[in-house]
Amino acid sequence: MSCYEIEALRLGLMTVLGVGDDSTRDHAEKELEGHLDGPIKGLAEADSLAAIERHLDAALVDLEEEVAAMDSDDPEYDYTRGRLLAVRDAERAVQRLSAQGESIVDGLGDAHDTLHETFPVEE
């Protein structure tokens, strides 16, 4: 059993944020062998936070459908529900990351405006 959504998200975030090392990337790619399709592939290959959010949402829909279709006495039911909770939590973390990024961009714009107000440039 593996949490393909989380491994794919890790790969996408490593790309977008420019973090991680080759061994971490290699490990995640190995975990995903044979499972790179649909939203999992989109997450693993994402090159922006917007793409990550879009593919993560699609992965959540798929996972919710998987849980809904399972019988509660299925030996993998609890694990799959746990995956769903972990992916929902990851979705909230990505939303926070995106909001923080937007806040930084807005703050830089404000700093730029303040500099021009404080030190006007005559043209």
Image (cartoon, grey):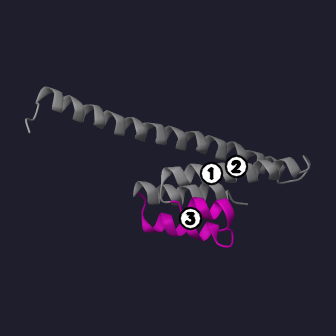
Residue 39 among magenta residues: yes
The residue that appears at 44% across and 56% down in the rendered structure is 16
Q: Main secondary structure of the magenta part?
A: helix
Between marks 2 and 1, how big is the CA–CA gap? 6 Å
Vertical position of residue 117 compared to residue 77: above or below: above
Do the residues under discs 2 and 1 have CB atoms within 8 angstroms? yes
- Residue 101 shown left or right of residue 63 in the figure: left
Name the residue beneath numbered marker 1.
56
Q: Quadrant of the C terminus?
A: top left
The residue that appears at 48% across and 55% down in the rendered structure is 48
Residue type at numbered disc 3: Ala
Look at the image and tell me whether residue 79 can be seen. Answer: no
Do the residues under discs 3 and 2 have CB atoms within 8 angstroms? no
Residue 26 among magenta residues: yes
Query: For residue 41, which numbered disc appears in the image?
Result: none
Q: Quadrant of residue 106?
A: top left
Mark 3 residue crowding within 10 angstroms, few (<14) / some (14–19) / many (20+): some
